[in-house]
Structures are given as structure tokens and as C-alpha cells.
Image (cartoon, grey):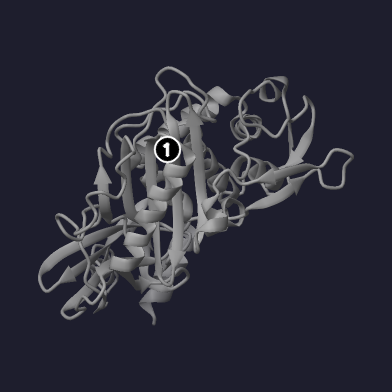
């Protein structure tokens, strides 16, 4: 009887779990919905490179020289903010933690919030200083808080870039001040911006137009967002500007209207007026031409997968962010379905480990795939736990 039960258990643990339901039509992730979108050819005529991307699906609506490796200036701080948000999620730091300013952090030039050596601010305040004022000093202070040194933090940045599959990105500092071997591309910046936006609370900072630091002190510091689109373009709430004499004027911007959020990146623009006008035009084009259809909203239950020999016998999957597909306005949504394919899991399983994929079909044709990661760490169970679990299953 026990032998028969073990065979059945082994079969169940090696199965692939498939869920199907109606969804919506879309282009392949990372590809334009049409080969040559009408009217899109002149969206960013003055930029050295540019890209327009649907934030939810990663579908590219428009691109121009998007893989060219160029100096990113302060757009570098998108990766810095991403590592900060991930550290918050992992519990390594808290928004209320105090961050001390080293002599080195205080010595940063360029954009800054004028931190004094030894001055302390909370993580929350440092994030404001980075997101609104592009504080180079605040960026280094946070790098030292998380990794001990800026150099160690830069190693983390490059490791995360590799994990995201960024082929034309290498960091040499955490703030974007001119440095050798420090570069990125419009495409890579859009990908890291999309990853940052999965932490929806980031727009609480990047979407502010103005705020104060040291408000109750004798020297309050007024912050004004370097990204003027958050005030003047309806729906804009981020993300990061950049400028050096080498990089010229750069911007990774995001805006949301109805159910559609897009990311626009331009690099090497001649001035702020042109930069903002061309990004606004990219937004206008997106909202006029496209819409999104949601498959899973953030927080929706997605399915359950057993974990062989785990402390937890199964993992319940909940959407960590919105899963949606990009459609041309007026598109048909007939004959569309999705499947959630989950790999058989055996403990230990680590949080964010790839465990399967969400596949969207139209008929029998695969349209796009989304990676699905483990929502939690599951350690291997002890023999006594496994024995009790086996006994309980036998007599159900």
C-alpha cells in the first residue's frame, strides 16, 4: 500500500500544472505590436536613442537606436532606487532606519541635497532626495547603508543588471557622475525602469513635484522634481532625469492613463524643452493608439504548486504585479487564452527563484510569455514532519 502511495505521490509532484481562461490578444513581449506603427517614425527625432514600452507586458511600441551604449548620467539612479526598494522588500532596511552620511558621500558634486558629514536622515528622506533632487550624495549614503561601500553596491548593481539580461549596461558608480566604463542603453534603461515600477510605492516619491527635507530644522531644504512632466503631463508620475555635458539631456519617464502604463526613454536630447516635448509626444501616441487588457491584477490568486519535501507542502501564488497584454484600440479579443505552467518543485526553494511561466495564446499560437517566480523561501522539512505528512495522506 505504501509503495503504491509513493508512486502516486511521485507522479503528482512531476506534473505540470496548467490553468486556462480567456484573456486578450497581444503582440509578443518585447516586440512592437505592428512591424512599423503608423505615425511612430518621427516620435523622437532629436534624441540619439529612444524607446517606448508598455510597462506591464514589456511590449516595445517604438524604438530608435535603442541598444546603443551611451552615458546614462543620473538615470543611473533607477538601478540605485531598484536596489533600495528590493532591500526594503527583503527586510534588510526599513523606511524609518537612520542613514549616516560619510565624508565621502558628502563630498559628491553635481546634483545634491547638501548632506553634511555625520548628518543623519531616514531612508524615506534619502529616497526623496534621490527621486526628486537627484541627490548624488544621498545615492552614495544609501549605497553605503546597504552594501557597506559604494564599490560593493556597484557590484550589486552590475549583478542585478546581468540578472535582468541587460547586454549594454555597466555601472562604475551609483549616481551617474561621469566615469570610464559607465554606460547603458535606452532599451536597458526601459527594462530596469519597468522592474522598478513593479514596486508600485516608488511613484510615491518619483511622482511628487515638490517637498521639503529638514522641514522642522533651522535649514529646511525645498525639493523640486527635476522631471517637470509630473506636473505638466496628466498621468505622469516618474521616473528619472539625467544630464552631463557628455550624455546631454536624458529622461526615463512613465505615465498611466486608465489601464495603460507606458515607459518612454530618450537619451542625448539637446535641451530640456525638446526632451520633454518629445517624451510627451511619445505618451500621446501611446494613449491614442493602444490599450491594455489585464490577465491578473496585483494580488490576484494565480494557482498552487506542491513543494516536495518542503516545510510548506505547497506554495500559493499571488500576482506580485499586474500581468496584462497590449492591444491596438479596437482589436478583437476572441480566441485568446492563457496557461500557467509550473515546474515540479523540490525543497529548498528560494524566494524569487524562477518556477514557471504564464503563456498567452491566440488559438495555438504563442503570443507572449511571462516569468513566474517563487513568492517565498521554502526550506527542506525534517524527517519527522515528512513522516507525519505521509501518514496523514495515507489515511485520508
Q: Is residue 349 visible?
A: no
Residue 205 horizontal/vertical position (percent): 61, 52
Residue at the far right: name it: 218
Q: Quadrant of the N terminus?
A: bottom left
Secondary element under disc 1, as helix, strand or loop, is: helix
Q: Is residue 121 left or right of residue 341?
A: right
Residue 150 horizontal/vertical position (percent): 57, 25
Query: In this view of the protein, which residue sits in the foreground, 2 or 277?
Result: 277
Q: What residue do we see at 81% from left, 43% from top?
A: 214
Residue at the far left: name it: 364
Residue 39 quadrant:
bottom left
Residue 249 horizontal/vertical position (percent): 45, 35
Query: In this view of the protein, which residue sits in the foreground, 80 or 136?
Result: 136
Residue at the far top: name it: 180
Decide: is 230 above or below 130: below
Q: What residue do we see at 50% from left, 48% from top?
A: 239
Residue 3 quadrant:
bottom left
Residue 317 quadrant:
bottom left
Q: Quadrant of the C terminus?
A: bottom left
Query: In this view of the protein, which residue sits in the foreground, 118 or 283?
Result: 283
Decide: is 220 above or below 236: above
Q: What residue do we see at 55% from left, 49% from top?
A: 228
Q: What residue do we see at 69% from left, 49% from top?
A: 95
Label 1: which residue? Answer: 160
Residue 382 horizontal/vertical position (percent): 48, 55
Amino acid at each position: 500500500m505504501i509503495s503504491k502511495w509513493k508512486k502516486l505521490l511521485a507522479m503528482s509532484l512531476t506534473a505540470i500544472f496548467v490553468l486556462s481562461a480567456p484573456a486578450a490578444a497581444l503582440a509578443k513581449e518585447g516586440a512592437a505590436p505592428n512591424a512599423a506603427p503608423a505615425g511612430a517614425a518621427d516620435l523622437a527625432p532629436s534624441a540619439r536613442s529612444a524607446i517606448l514600452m508598455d510597462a506591464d507586458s514589456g511590449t516595445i511600441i517604438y524604438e530608435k537606436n535603442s541598444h546603443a551604449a551611451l552615458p546614462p548620467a543620473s538615470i543611473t539612479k533607477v538601478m540605485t532606487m531598484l536596489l533600495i526598494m528590493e532591500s526594503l522588500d527583503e527586510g534588510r532596511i526599513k523606511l524609518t532606519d537612520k542613514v549616516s552620511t560619510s565624508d565621502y558621500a558628502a563630498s559628491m558634486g553635481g546634483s545634491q541635497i547638501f548632506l553634511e558629514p555625520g548628518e543623519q536622515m531616514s531612508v524615506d528622506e534619502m529616497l526623496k532626495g534621490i527621486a526628486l533632487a537627484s541627490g548624488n550624495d544621498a545615492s552614495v549614503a544609501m549605497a553605503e547603508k546597504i552594501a557597506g561601500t559604494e564599490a560593493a553596491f556597484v557590484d550589486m548593481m552590475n549583478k542585478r543588471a546581468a540578472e535582468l539580461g541587460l547586454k549594454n549596461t555597466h555601472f562604475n558608480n551609483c549616481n551617474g557622475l561621469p566615469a570610464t566604463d559607465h554606460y547603458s542603453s535606452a532599451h536597458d534603461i526601459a527594462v530596469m525602469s519597468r522592474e522598478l515600477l513593479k514596486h508600485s510605492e516608488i511613484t510615491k516619491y518619483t511622482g511628487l513635484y515638490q517637498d521639503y527635507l529638514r522641514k522642522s530644522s533651522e535649514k529646511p531644504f525645498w525639493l523640486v522634481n527635476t522631471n517637470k512632466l509630473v506636473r505638466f503631463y496628466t498621468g505622469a508620475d516618474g521616473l528619472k532625469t539625467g544630464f552631463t555635458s557628455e550624455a546631454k539631456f536624458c529622461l526615463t519617464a512613465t505615465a498611466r492613463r486608465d489601464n495603460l502604463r507606458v515607459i518612454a526613454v530618450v537619451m542625448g536630447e539637446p535641451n530640456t524643452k525638446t526632451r520633454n516635448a518629445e517624451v510627451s509626444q511619445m505618451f500621446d501616441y501611446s494613449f491614442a493608439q493602444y490599450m491594455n487588457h489585464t490577465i491578473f491584477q496585483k494580488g490576484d490568486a494565480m494557482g498552487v504548486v506542491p513543494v516536495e519535501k518542503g516545510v510548506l507542502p505547497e506554495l500559493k501564488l499571488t500576482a506580485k504585479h499586474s500581468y496584462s497584454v497590449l492591444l491596438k484600440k479596437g482589436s478583437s479579443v476572441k480566441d485568446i487564452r492563457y496557461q500557467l505552467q509550473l515546474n515540479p518543485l523540490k525543497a529548498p526553494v528560494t524566494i524569487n527563484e524562477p518556477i514557471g511561466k504564464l503563456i498567452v495564446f491566440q488559438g495555438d499560437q504563442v503570443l507572449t510569455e511571462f516569468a513566474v517566480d517563487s513568492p517565498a523561501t521554502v526550506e527542506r522539512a525534517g524527517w519527522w514532519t515528512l513522516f507525519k505528512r505521509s501518514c496523514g495522506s495515507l489515511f485520508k
